[in-house]
Amino acid sequence: MQYGYFDDQRREYVITQPDTPLPWINYLGCQEYFGLISNTAGGYSFYRDARLRRLTRYRYNHLPLDQGGRYLYLRDDESGRYWSPSGAPTNCDLERYSCRHGMGYTVIGSVYQGISAHTRYFVPLDETLEIWQLTVINQRARPAWLSIFSCVEFCLWDAQDDATNFQRNFSIGEVEIADGVIYHKTEYRERRDHFGWFACSEPVEGFDTQREAFFGPGRGWERPLVVEGGESANSVAHGWAPVGSHHVRLRLEPGETRQVQFVLGYHENARDQKFDPPGSQILNKKTVRPIIARYRDAAAVDAAFCRLRTYWDGLLSVCQVETPSVHANRMVNIWNAYQCMMTFNLSRSASFYESGVGRGLGFRDSNQDLLGFVHMAPERARQRILDLAATQYPGGGAYHQYQPLTKKGNNEIGGNFNDDPHWLILGVAAYLKETADWSILDEPAPFDNEPGSEQPLYEHLHRSFRYTLERLGPHGLPLIGRADWNDCLNLNCFSETPGQSFQTTTNKDGKVAESVFIAGLFVLAARELAAIACRRGAAADAQRCLDAAARMTETVKAHGWDGAWFVRAYDDFGRKIGSKECAEGQIFIEPQGFCVMAGIGLDDGRARQALDSVRRHLATPHGIVLQQPAYSRYYPHLGEISSYPPGYKENAGIFCHNNPWIMIAEAMTGNGDGTFDYYLRINPSAREPISDVHCNEPYVYAQMIAGRDAPAHGEAKNSWLTGTAAWNYYAATQWILGIRPEYDGLRIAPVIPEAWAGFRAVRKFRGVTYNIEVHRQGPGNRVSLRVDSQPLAGDIVAPPADGRAWVAVEVAIG
Ligand code: BGC
Ligand code: NOJ
């Protein structure tokens, strides 16, 4: 069953009923001001940091889940009937409801009793505000007298405090109202230099800023007293809960269309210009008035919207493909790329599954996210890399997370996740291959943000590499520390206390438990670093890396191979995890993917064997589960992984993040059909027809799909902000379509299904547009290339020496 459809032409997903199984959301904003918006206009907004600068309030675990949002109420002033054109919160029987989620904007609307009303929500580029552009059409045969009421509930800035510290919060709320603009200035009197504002393009009939006055005692979003009565109370909030509501009256002739803009913004004043007149406690509005004036004008709003569309068209134009698969096309061309950018912008901070108060930016997460967006925003990738490097410790380890506002490492969670340092090497390698900007390696970056400790980025990479060599366990495999990629494999934790954090508790000295996954990651990273060193002319460095990679490969073959697949780890007792010797958790996905990606076993058949084992033991129609058999009980020596009921999350859920590792590994072994089969199993668009099973949005990846041990096998959770976005994009574009940036140029080495006659792609790379046409000539993956009609040896197309900006590449495959 579906709840909508893709409109690929407009790059939109159109939801045709408000009651989707879960809120199906989109993001507004792509620079500093962000909002989440559900298909019924629920959600919230913030400036840069979802915890510390929350502009509007969101109640966690509310019913319905997405309630609290950007609501407009329409009221028929003749009959007194009122409704929300976005479905929620009044839930009237709407006709022709639709929600169009697009690139950085959402349009929600409906028809009710002959009145059509649609609101376009978006954040203009280079502004810290959001626009709600409402279009109302009177489709009746007689004039309509309407009232519009807007409403937002302000958050008192720190979302954590806002949700907990009521003894203070109920006394600090402050607002001002001037020229129909509502200013939210809680705490502005003391240490905050920022305020919120909410304006309307029309003259207002009235306003409200005190929540209880607007809603009325005992009422909620669905039945506000003011809307019911058709008149604002003109309330001025003192303490309690400040809201912003305008009342606008419209008279519409039959067939008449009107537009009304509501604009919600965030603004900062210089500390010495906070008040006007100086010395008073009155908010200085002079600095924000020109901005407000600009967006009261419909033409300016339309122009800002066009600019936003052009911006997204530009980003997406870097890689566009035309394959025989509609699911591959729309994910690669539109939604997967878009999700990669959103994940870059927000990391894991704010979604309907990440509260925005819990965590900073993950070190490994952010490095992996790079794989998905570096081609669209290389300058931002550069900055991200340097920020990440600055949160490394002098010993090469890294803070597991850092705070986006301060860019400092998060002390609460600390480091000692022994995989973390290597992701930096992979991130930097991806950046260099895309951009050839070798200068980044000489860029000084401090350790632990300590001034004076700066070293070139190149040195940071070597410390990452050495980190593991200094932490080898009894078998010569890397010690796991707190956890590796699998945050829930906590082999040194041994927690028996409810509520204790699996991530930060370590009750063991960590000298025994080893990770085969890190071994694979290490080999891959060491090879990448060797390639970087080699091109930098540091032959000795390169050799050191290659030697270490070769030694680790032998160690994996000796102690990390279980006969038909790679072992997952050794626990604190030195016993195998992910082995046929185990009662549960006999085979894990991660080492099969990463060891093969690192090239281990490609030469001796083990890679193929491991992948066949994955297919036999882990593959389900809904994707590949993380391990089997699921852990049926809690094991203190394994940690959080066994805390989940079987089939969920890391305990045998389908972790969509690491399915692409298997896809890439399959592609490396030349299995085009097998690779694409896995790709489609978790492709959100391909799963659209089973939206009632999948439940999450059909246009973006979710972190997890319930595994075969779960009663809800096939049900997705934790959509949007996940490493899944980058890895699937990377697998699809670089390994299936095989358009792969390398140091010397663009490699074209597709591993596509046998039945495909070919595909076309346009890829912009280092300032050159590559027009690629692939034609199948027979089975297999061998390619021969012609570049601008000239045959080319090999499969790497170097940037044209004569400075041309356009290259035609014909590829015969088979
Ligand atoms: C989740 C992981 C997450 C970790 C750290 C665990 O509960 O299952 O996916 O990485 O917490 O936030
Ligand atoms: C989510 C985390 O953000 C990521 O870093 C981790 O690798 C996965 N969970 C698996 O545990």
Image: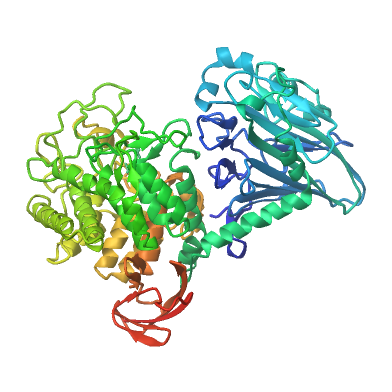
Please name the residue shown 80% across and 23% down the image. Answer: 234
Would residue 85 be found to the left or right of residue 14 on screen?
right
Please name the residue shown 56% across and 31% down the image. Answer: 54
Would residue 338 be found to the left or right of residue 220 on screen?
left
Please name the residue shown 22% across and 38% down the image. Answer: 395
Foreground pick, 477 / 252? 477
Foreground pick, 377 / 521? 377
Q: Quadrant of residue 651?
A: top left
Q: Quadrant of residue 615?
A: bottom left
The image quadrant in which ligand 2 is located: top left
Q: Position of residue 614 (x, y in %)?
A: 24, 57
Q: Position of residue 735 (x, y in %)?
A: 34, 66
Q: Position of residue 625 (x, y in %)?
A: 30, 50
Q: Is residue 581 visible?
A: yes
Applied colour scheme? rainbow
Q: Position of residue 131 (x, y in %)?
A: 69, 44
